[in-house]
Image (spheres, grey):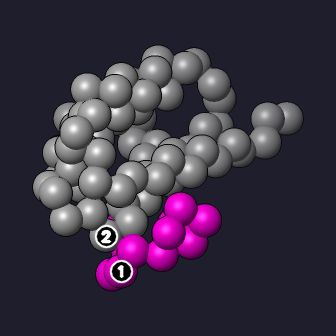
Amino acid sequence: MCKTVSVAWINYNSMKFMSIALESLRSLYELNYPNMRILLIDNCSNDGSDKILKNYVEKVDKKNITKFYRTSKNYGYAGG
């Protein structure tokens, strides 16, 4: 029996390196790991990167394995 594996993917103002961020997400979707879930957490970005990532997930995530969360304030890396 396969257990569910959750991957926490934290974002904060990643517009400066968006191509790398999107490549990172793309690589997760290309994994053929059973029962994987992606928790994409935006830590209150203010550069628009949250919108780009959310749109990307809506277009690419055919298996509906991603949950997108946006915090109401920046809690720092560990808090996110």
- Looking at the image, which residue sits at the far bottom? 72
Mark number displayed over residue 73: 1
Task: Residue at 40% x, 32% y: name it.
Answer: 25
- Asked if residue 11 is positioned above or below residue 60 in the image, the reply reads below
Residue 69 visible? The answer is no
- Looking at the image, which residue sits at the far front? 16
Residue 45 visible? The answer is yes
Among the two numbered marks 1 and 2 on one chain, the one whose residue lies closer to the N terminus: 2
- Asked if residue 15 is positioned above or below residue 1 in the image, the reply reads below
Q: Position of residue 18 (x, y in %)?
A: 25, 34
Q: Position of residue 67 (x, y in %)?
A: 42, 55
Q: Is residue 18 left or right of residue 65?
A: left
Screen quadrant of the N terminus: top right
Q: Is residue 70 left or right of residue 46?
A: right
Q: Are marks 1 and 2 in contact (CB under 8 Å)?
A: yes
* Number of residue marks: 2
Task: Residue at 56% x, 72% y: name it.
Answer: 79
Mark number displayed over residue 4: none
Assess whether residue 51 is covered by the magenta stretch.
no
Q: Residues within 10 Å of mark 1 (few under 14, many from 20)?
A: few
What residue would you read off at disc 2? Answer: 44
* Nearer to the camera, 39 or 62: 39
Residue range of the region highlighted in magenta in the rendering: 70-80
* Nearer to the camera, 80 or 2: 80
**Amino acid at dot 1:** Lys
* Nearer to the camera, 65 or 1: 65
Element type at marker 2?
A: loop
Disc 1 to disc 2, how far (Cα)?
5 Å
Q: Residues within 10 Å of mark 2 (few under 14, many from 20)?
A: many
Q: Position of residue 54 (x, y in %)?
A: 24, 50
Assess whether residue 74 is covered by the magenta stretch.
yes
